[in-house]
Image (tube, rainbow, N blue to C red):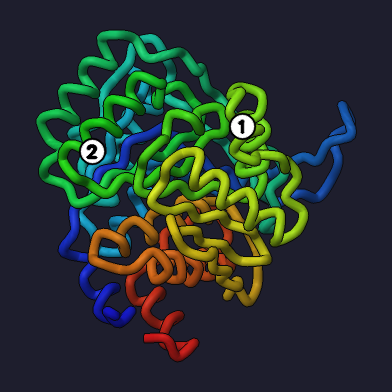
Amino acid sequence: MTSYKHLIASFKSKKILVLGDVILDQHIRGTVSRVSPEAPVPIVLQDGEPTYSPGGAANVASNLKSLGANVTLVGRIGSDNEGKIFLSSLKKNKISTKGIFKDQSIPTIIKTRIVAHHQQVLRLDREQNNDLSSKTLNKLQNFLTKNIGHYDAIILSDYGKGLLSKALIEFTCDLSRREKKIITVDPKVEHFSYYEGVTSITPNRKEAENAIRNIKITHSASHRLGLNSDCLKTLLDVERAGQQLLKFLKLESLLITLGEQGMCVFEKGQKSKQIFTRAREVFDVTGAGDTVIAVFTLALSVGATKFQAADLANYAAGIVVGKMGAVAVTRDELFNAVKHHGAA
C-alpha cells in the first residue's frame, strides 16, 4: 500500500478539471458598538475595503491548486463587474480561466458576508438560477469534448445554481466513462439520480437523508431496494442508507461526511468503514465539503485506495474547520497533520 507521504508528494503531477457552479465570495469586516435606532439590528462600522475570493466550485479548484495540482475550472459568470473580479481572483490563484464562459442571461453569483469581531453578522446572496441556454450548453459540451482527455479526474461541484442540468451532468458522465476518467460528485439532492455509475459521491448526512427521501418519492423501485429510512440518526442508519445508495446508483464508492462523527466510506462488495474526525477545534465549517472532495479526488488520481483517499480527506477537513472562512489546505499542512498522528 502506498504511503501517505508518497501520495501527497504525487499530488503535483496531476491535472484535475472542476465543473460546477462558481460563486464570488465577498467579505466585509468591521466592528459593532451599538444597535440601530431604526430597527433592532447591529450597526457595523466597516474596516477597510471588502475582500474577494473564489467560492462554490471555485473553492474546490482553489483547494486543488493549493495542494499542487494543475487545475482547470469550468463554469459560467455574468457579464458584469463581479464577473471581472471573479476572473481576477482566479488568475491571482493561478487557476486556469479558459473554461469560464460568460452568460448574458445571469448575473455573477455573489455571497456577501458581513463579519464583526470574528462573528458573521449577516449574509446577503445575489443569484439568478436560470437554466442553461442551449448556446451556453453547447459551449460547455464542446469544451469538455475537446479537453477532457488531458485530465486525470473530473469533479462535479453541484451547488444547485443552474449550471449542472440533467443534460450537462449526463453528457459529462458519459464522456468521462468513455475516456475512463475518475469522476466524483459533491451532490445536490435534486440531482442524485443523475449521478448513476460515477466513481464516487460525497454527500453529508443531511444530503444522504434527503436523497433517500427523494428517491422514495420518485422511484417505485425504492421499496424493493430497501430504501426505507429517511432519518439517519444512528451510525446503523447511515450504514443501511449508504449501502442502499451505493447499490441504487451503481457507484464504485460513496463517502458520507458526518460532522463531528467523522466520515463513513462505502465500497462495492465491502463493509463500510468509519473514519473518526481529527478536528481539534471547530471554528467554521464553511468550505469543508469542498476540501473533502478536492483531497479525496486528488488522492484517488495518484493511486490511493478509497479508504486512504477518504482518510486523507478527513485529515484535510480537520485542518480547514479550525480556521475562519473557506480556506484552502496546503500540502505541507496535510503532510504535517498526517505526520502528527503517526500515519505518514
Mark nearer the viewer, 1 or 2 = 1
Could you classify mark 2 by the number of other residues whose Cα lies within 10 Å: few (under 14), some (14-19), or many (20 or more)? many
In terms of depth relative to the viewer, which is nearer, 227 or 340? 227
x and y, in percent, of residue 267 in the image = 44, 58
Amino acid carrying mark 1 in the image = Ser
x and y, in percent, of residue 276 in the image = 60, 73
- Give the mark count: 2
Query: Is 99 left, or right, of 218 in this rendering?
Result: left
Q: Are marks 1 and 2 in contact (CB under 8 Å)?
A: no
Q: Residue at x 65, y 41 (%)?
A: 226
Amino acid carrying mark 2 in the image = Ser
Q: Is residue 85 above or below residue 237?
A: above
x and y, in percent, of residue 300 in the image = 30, 61
Q: Residue at x 25, y 43 (%)?
A: 17
Secondary structure at badge 2 equals helix
Q: Residue at x 40, y 26 (%)?
A: 164
Residue 240 — which label? Answer: none
Query: Is 104 left, or right, of 194 in this rendering?
Result: left
The residue wearing badge 2 is 176
* Mark closest to the chain's N terminus, 1 or 2: 2
Is any atom of residue 329 visible in this view?
Answer: yes
Query: Is 10 left, or right, of 116 in this rendering?
Result: left
Could you classify mark 1 by the number of other residues whose Cα lies within 10 Å: few (under 14), some (14-19), or many (20 or more)? some
Is any atom of residue 25 visible in this view?
Answer: no
Q: Where is the C terminus found, in terms of image quarters?
A: bottom left
The residue wearing badge 1 is 222
Q: Is residue 258 above or below residue 98?
A: below
Q: Where is the N terminus found, in terms of image quarters?
A: bottom left
Q: Which quarter of the picture shows residue 28?
A: top right
